[in-house]
Image (tube, rainbow, N blue to C red):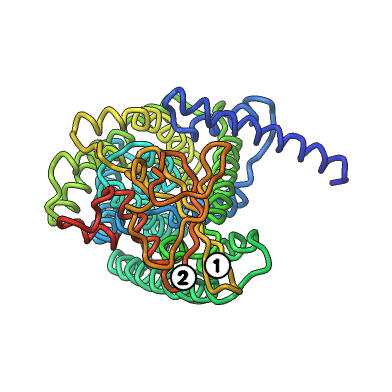
Amino acid sequence: MDVHDLDRILLAGAAVLLVAIVAVRLSGRLGLPSLLIYLGMGLLLGESGLGIQFENAELAHALGFAALVIILTEGGLTTRWNEVRPVMPLGVVLATVGVAISVGVVACVAHFILGLDWQISVLLGAVTSPTDAAAVFSVLRKVPIRPRLRGALEAESGLNDAPTVLLVTLVSTGGLGDHGLPYFAGLVVYELVFGALFGLLIGWAAVGLLRRVALGSAGLYPLAIVSMAFLSYAGGTVLLHVSGFAAVYVTSLVLGRAELPHRMATRSFVDGIAWLAQIGLFVMLGLLASPSKFRLNDVLLALVIGIAVTVVGRFAAVAISATPFRIPWNEQTFIAWAGLRGAVPIVLATIPLAEQVPQADRVFNVVFVLVLLFTLLQGPSLPWVAKRLGVLDDNAAQEVDIDVAPLESLGADMLQVRVPSESKLAGVEIGELRLPQGVSISLVIRGTRAFVPDRRTVLRAGDALLVVAPSGLREQTVRRLRAVSRAGRLAGWFGERGRENL
């Protein structure tokens, strides 16, 4: 490859990326998940469209896993810990027991009803059972559902990659038949538990390091956090042979919960590279697919397997997993219907392709068609389903955005606070915030105008505030601002004090 070939690749890549960015707005207007458009772009560019040849399943497998690490990092950083913490046990059960039930249902349907051999049947069950983090994070955060539902679905999608990757790998290499189900169950427990513990350790170490080391530029903080996430993933898989996906998700949860310097800049950076990872991942998977090789039998098989996993397997998995937690039937129904498939099943389908399993190309084709059809069905219907089931949280205020920049020489921090449109900070006077003594709001930026406020200044939606707080009072100040954002000016009074600790 010479420099001219590289220039042409850069030109094509930039054009695809710009079209994909514009497609985000289009998908929002049409109510479609953007992944469908990206997959369509890949199909258009591939051998059945413009003729670009891409058949390297091993490369697709490796790049797909790298993209999933970035997507999980962004998801963990932006997950609200106060929503995930109460439902984390439910998320773990859905990611393990729920996945096992779904795999069993699909495998039995494929073997006893469709007549497929056990290896292909179990592979179809394993690759279609996990929910997709990218789809869940991007779609559900646009639907104002109850916090515990969103938390359970996000925790499940962040953790269920680990057991399914292990199962697909063992089935593809023949390891499951050699060792049996007890070995597999023990291995899943080991990988999840020690992967999570390793991720927790890396997360705590990263928080302590970033709080004590003043980096020379604000742009270095996002790079440091992304590096820590990849260290957690690679360290877990290479050194301890545990689940790197569980490790990176837990590390990201810890980093997202901590009040680190330049938090908003970090989130913006990671959000950008997560979009890049999603776009690249879906376009690449579209390139890998060959629609000319899709047979009618593959489409029909995709419909049957899709119904088995979405209607039978998923609902059975949620009912058995959620009933011990006393989750109402309407919430169970929504959790079952909101188990979105996306890139993860297609990426998992590249594992048997790379291992050259017999009929692996058919498994890939079936999974690709299944993801297209059922994402098109489930994604746009979620707002309607949530409304009909009565699980919308109409009073949910958006989380107030707070960025932190250290003022080393003064022993203080400058907080940049943005007032969301639904926040109850809007309409509150500065004096009614009751911030800790020694903390001051030094500037309010409203539209194109900036001014120094007084105690009677009333905040408005869209305002940006610059708050200066001694370092020892930073966390107390953040808790207070978030409490008022959720509960209004009376937060802390009349039984509302607990909200300040959320």
Task: Kindly report the distance in space between the C-alpha atoms of the residues bearing marks 2 and 1.
Answer: 8 Å
Q: Which residue is mark 2?
A: 203
Kind of residue at badge 1 = Met
Q: Quadrant of residue 94?
A: bottom left
Which residue is pictured at 34% across the width and 66% down the height? 188
Q: Secondary structure at mark 2?
A: helix
Q: Nearer the viewer, residue 158 or 63?
A: 158
Tell me, yes or no, if residue 351 can be seen here.
no
Q: Quadrant of residue 109?
A: top left
Query: In this rendering, is residue 105 above or below 380?
Result: below
The circle on residue 385 is: none
Q: Which residue is mark 1?
A: 228
Position of residue 383 in the picture relative to residue 475 (left or right): left
Label 2–label 1 contact, CB within 8 A: yes
Instruction: Reply above or below: 468 against 315.
Output: below
Residue 417, horizontal then vertical, whole percent:
47, 51
Instruction: Report the residue at 25% width, 45% height from top.
Output: 105
**Secondary structure of residue under mark 1:** helix
Task: Using residue 151 as the reference point, say whether residue 446 is left or right of it.
Answer: right
Q: What's the residue at 23%, 51% (across, down)?
A: 490
If the image is split into quadrants, where does the C terminus sit?
bottom left
